[in-house]
Amino acid sequence: MIKKMREMPVIILKLEALLRRLSLKHQRRKSIEEELAMRYAGFRGEQALDYHIAQIPQKNHFIFQDLRLPLSKDSFFQIDILLLSQQYFIILEAKNIAGTIFIDQNQLLRTLDEKEDSYPNPIQQVENQQYNLDELIENHCKIKLPITSFVAMTNPSSIIKPNPQYSAVAKKVIRPAAIRQRFGAVNYSYQKELIEKIELQKLSRLLIGMHTPSDPDILKQFQIGKGEILTGIYCDQCNNLSMTKRQRVWECTICSYTSKNAHIQALIDYRLLIGSTISCKQCSSFFQISSSISSKLLRSLNLNFFGEGKNRAYKLELEDLQKLIKNK
Ligand SMILES: [Zn+2]
């Protein structure tokens, strides 16, 4: 049974918004594009596992896709897939890396097009997650169950080199197609139910409650000032900030494409890049429209707000704005 579904990571939405609103000549564009490609590869790698996880018996398992759990006040650890049962827990880490892969105690070495790159050792990564999860569960629920972990190499074109000096590679590094069989072997080894179903449900609620999606300050990460973010309403068709307000729709001054909800996408961009609340004045300068139109637009969306008159600020909740776009 799936208890938590994977969602599109906010970092991907932020990187896309940043590319929409940064000059084509901006010197950071290339590094933002590289980061976006890397994040997409990671996300697709995790998604590739979901199909194989769906093949294992669902009845006695609680499955969580992408959990980010607190380690201490400001630090977190992230798990791609967690499977809970009354007998054991399994952690699965996805790695979407192309090329020839060799893992030793210190690192993962990837050779591609005669170039060698080094990545952190994924076996150690997943064993650290295992340790942190064990601590967290024991601290909160006084439950101790055997935890097993695997690293799934999701890129079908990659070649994994064996390492006889490091036995964990053969034990822990698997292909997605082996998930059913490997999980079956764990199931066979740990048949004794160690906790009650009701405790498992309690633990499941606790983990979902603790999940904290990452929401990084992308402008700080790339050292970009708010003043460098381009304003205006974006046209999806010709990729310019060229939409202008007509009576009932937004119309592109370049390609004549019309849209009813281009302003909601602009509010999403504002939320992703600038801030989580917006005043009428901030909206009119970001949209490049008059303050009377921006006031009317903001009121029409039924967003939560605080303050009155000029001091009124509307709350920009990502989920609410995404729903508004879907419903239009
Ligand atoms: Zn256009």
Image (spheres, rainbow, N blue to C red):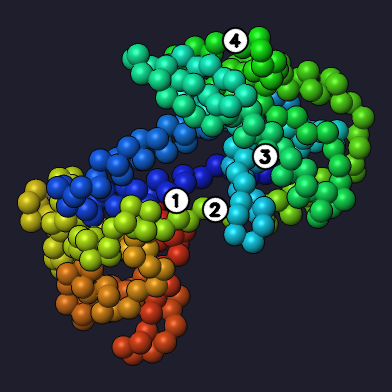
Give the residue at mark 2.
Answer: 213
Residue drawn where x is 35% and y is 74% of the image: 278
SS under mark 2: loop
- Name the side, left or right, on which 218 lies relative to 100: left
Quarter of the rendering containing residue 3? top right
- Looking at the image, tell me whether mark 4 or mark 2 is earlier in sequence order: 4
Q: Is mark 3 within 8 Å of ligand 1?
A: no
Q: CA distance from mark 3 to mark 1?
A: 22 Å
Which label sits in the foreground, 4 or 2?
A: 4
Horizontal relation, residue 11 to residue 146: left or right: left
Cα–Cα span, label 4 and label 3 = 24 Å
Q: Which mark is residue 129?
A: 3
Q: Amino acid at mark 2?
A: Pro
- For the residues labelled 4 and 2, say whether their Cβ atoms are less than 8 Å apart: no
Count of marks placed on residues: 4
- In the rendering, at what x and y percent does residue 174 appear? 62, 18
**How many residues crowd mark 3 within 10 Å: few (<14), some (14–19), many (20+)?**
many
Q: Which residue is mark 4?
A: 162
Q: Residue furthest bottom?
A: 309
Can you tell which of label 4 and label 3 is closer to the viewer? 4
- Horizontal and vertical percent position of residue 306: 44, 83
**Tag 2 and tag 1, C-beta contact below 8 Å:** yes
| Mark 1 crowd level (few <14, some 14–19, many ≥20, 10 Å Cα) | some
Residue that label 1 marks: 10
Foreground mark, 4 or 1, reads: 4
Cα distance, mark 3 to mark 2? Answer: 16 Å
Up-down: is 183 above or below 276? Answer: above
- Image position of 257 with respect to 89: above or below: below
Residue occupying the point 62% across, 24% down = 105
Name the image quarter holding residue 40. top left
